[in-house]
Image (cartoon, coloured by chain):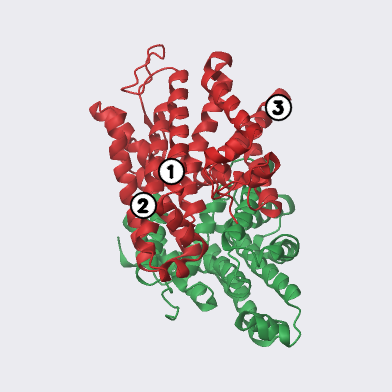
Amino acid sequence: MRGVGAVLRGAPRAATGLAVLGAALLVAPLLVDDYLLSVILITLYFAFVGQAWNLMMGYAGQLSLGHALYVGLGGYAAAAFFVHFGLTPWAGMVIGILVAAAFAAGIGLLAFRFGIGGVYFALLTIAVAEFTRILFEHFEWVGATGGFFLPVENREINDLLMLRGSPAMFYYVILAMTVGLFLANVALIRSRMGYYWMAIREDQDAAQALGINTFRYKMMAVVLSASLTALGGVFLAFYNNNLFPIDAFGIHRSIEIILAPIIGGLGTLFGPILGAFILTPLGEVLTWALDQLGVQMAGVKHLFYGLVLLVIIRSLPGGVWPWFARRLGIEGPEARP
Amino acid sequence: MTWDTVASILIGGALTGLVYSLMALGLSVIFGVIRVVNFAHGEMMTLAMFAGVFLFTGGGLDPILSLPIVAGTLFILGYALQRRLVEPFIARPEHEQFILLLAVAILLVNGLLLAFGPDARSVTVDYAFDSFELGPIFIDKVKAYAAGVGVLVAAGLLMFFRYTRTGKAIRACSDNLMGAQVVGLNIRRLYALTFGLGVACVGAAGCLLSLLVDVTPMLGPELTLLAFVIVIIGGLGSMMGALLGGIVVGLSEALAGLLIVPSMKSMFSFGLLILILAFRPQGLFGKRT
C-alpha cells in the first residue's frame, strides 16, 4: 500500500488538480459573493461531518442512521453554555464533545455488549436520536420547541475566541476543520486502529479470531465519530445562530449527513469530500434554477438527492470516488474492495 | 380521573394498536421471508393514508370501503418494486439494501410533499364522534371499526399463509430456501408476491389509520420507526409477535398520553425499544435463539 502523497506523485494530473482546488478554496472569499460563499461553506460542513460519519460506517462498518444526534448535542451544549454563562465555544466545544461521546458510548455499550448488529444497531441509533429530539422539545433551559437563539452581533468584527464574526471567518474555520480532519484521517486509517477497523468491517468473526478486541475498537470508532460530528455541530450552531430540536435531531438531518459519503464512496478518504462537492452545489443550482423559473416547491432538492442516491446505489455502489480515481489513473490506496 | 375514563382511554389505545399491528405485520412478513428490511415502510403507509383521504374527499368513499382498492394498488406497487428494484439487491451487502430502501423512502416523502404540500389532512366520517357504550365505558366507534377490519385483514393473511398452496410455498422459502429451490418453487415470483402482500398490508393499515390520525408527508419516517418498534418488541419475523407488539405500543402510547404530556408519547415507545434491545433483543414474544 502506498501513501496518499506517493499516489499523488505518481499521478501528476491529480496532484495538480488538488493544488488548484486548494488554492481556489483559500482565496474563495475574495472572489465570490456572499451567497456562493455560503454554498461552499455548507458544502465544506457536509464534507466535514461526512468524513466523521465515514470513519464509523466506511471504515469500521457500523451503520449509524442517527448522526444528527451528535450534531444537535454538540451544538446545543456549546450554544447553551455560551448564551447562559458567556463561555467561549472553544470550551463549550469540549462539553459538547463530552456529552456526544457519552451518548455514543451508551449506544455502543448497549449494542456491542448485547451483540446487537446490522439493522438493530441502525435502528437503535435512530431511536436514541428521536428520543433525544422529543426530550429537547420539552427542555425549557434551551428553549424547547420554540428554538434556542444565539445573539447576532455586529458581523464586521471577527471575534475568533467567541466565534462571532463575518461569513468569511466562518468559512476559514470550516475549511481548516475539513482539511484538518482529512489529514487526521490519512494518518488514522494507516494506523493500527485503522487496519483493525477495516478488518472488523470485512469480517468481524475473523478479526476476533485474530485476537483483535472488536468491542474496544468498535467503541473507539463510535465515540470518535460522534465527537467529531459534535464538533461539526458546534460550528453549525454558531454559524446559523439558531437551534430547533426538529432541525437539530430530526431523521432528515441524519440522512443528509450520510448522503455525501455514500455517493462519494464509503470507506474512501476523498469520497465524503467529493460527494459533498457534487451533491450540495447541484442541489443549490436546482433550487436556484427553479427559483428563476418562478417555481417554489418544497421537497424538490431532497427528491433529487433521493434520486441520486438510488442511481448511485444501483449502478455504482462503491461511490463516485473509486470510479473517478481510476479515470485519473490513481488506484486509491484506500479503495474499498 | 375515574376508572372508567382510564378504561376507555386504554381500550382506545389498544384498538389503535391493532391498526399499528397490521402495519407491523407487513414489515414482519417481508423481513421474515425475503430477509430485506423495508426502510420505506412508514412512507408507503403515508402513501396509503393519502389515498384513503383523497378517495374520501374526492369520491366520498369511506376508507373502510376504499381499503380493497388501496391495498390492491399497493400490492401491485410492492410486487413491481421487488421485481424491478429490490431483487438484484438480495445477494448484495446488507447496508446497500438499507440505502436502497432509504432512497425509496426519501423519494416517497418528498414526492408526497411536492404533490400535496406539508398540510395535515384528515378524514371525518359521519360516525366520527359516535361511540359504543359498555356501561360506563365509552368505546370510540371509528377506532372499533378500524381495529375490527384490521383484525379481519390480519386473520385473512394468517389463513392465507396457513392453508393455501401459495402461502405454504412462501413459508417454505422462509424456512429453507435451498429446499424450496430444490423442489422447484419459483422463488423470484414468490418473493415478489410476498413483498406485494407486505406492502398491501401497509396499504390496508394506512387506509384504516387515515380514519384515526391526520396525515402529512412527514409522518412517514415516524411510522417506519413505529413499525420497527412494534416488530422488535414482538420479535422480528414473528407474525403473532407483530400483532401483540402493536397492542403493547398502542397501550403504552395511551398510557403516556394519560400520565405525562401527550406530545411525549412517542418518546415512550422509543424508550421501550431501547429497553427491549438492551434486555430482550429477541423480542417480548420471540424465542431466544
Q: Badge 1 is on which residue?
A: A187
Residue B7, horizontal then vertical, whole percent: 37, 68
Quadrant placement of the C terminus of chain B: bottom left
Label 1 with label 2: CB-CB less than 8 Å = no
Marking on residue A104? 2
Which marked residue is nearer to the observer: mark 3 or mark 1? 1
Query: What residue sits 42% from the left and 66% below the top?
Result: A116
Specify few, some or many for label 2: CA neighbours under 10 Å numbering under 14, 14-19, or 20 or more: many
Q: Which of label 1 and label 2 is nearer to you? A: 1
Which quarter of the picture shows residue A260?
top right
**On screen, residue B277 above or below A223:** below
How many neighbours does mark 1 have within 10 angstroms: few (below 14), some (14-19), or many (20 or more)?
A: few
Residue A289: numbered disc: 3
- Seen in the picture, residue A110 relative to B216 is either above or below; the reply is below
Instruction: Look at the numbered disc 1 and give the secondary structure of its residue.
Output: helix
Q: Colour of chain B?
A: green
Viewer-proximal residue, B251 or B217?
B217
User: Are the residues flagged by discs 3 and 2 from a single subunit?
Assistant: yes
For residue B265, above or below residue B20:
above
- In the rendered image, the residue lying farthest to the top is A156
Q: CA distance from mark 1 to mark 2?
A: 23 Å
- Could you say where residue B223 lies in the image, as x and y percent from the top left? 53, 57
Chain under label 3? Answer: A
Q: CA distance from mark 3 to mark 2?
A: 40 Å
Q: Secondary structure at mark 3?
A: helix
Amino acid at pointer 1: Ala
A208 vs B81, left or right, is: left
Q: Earlier in the sequence, mark 1 or mark 2?
A: 2
Q: In terms of depth relative to the viewer, which is nearer, B127 or A91?
A: A91
- Identify residue type, mark 3: Ala
* Figure chain in red: A
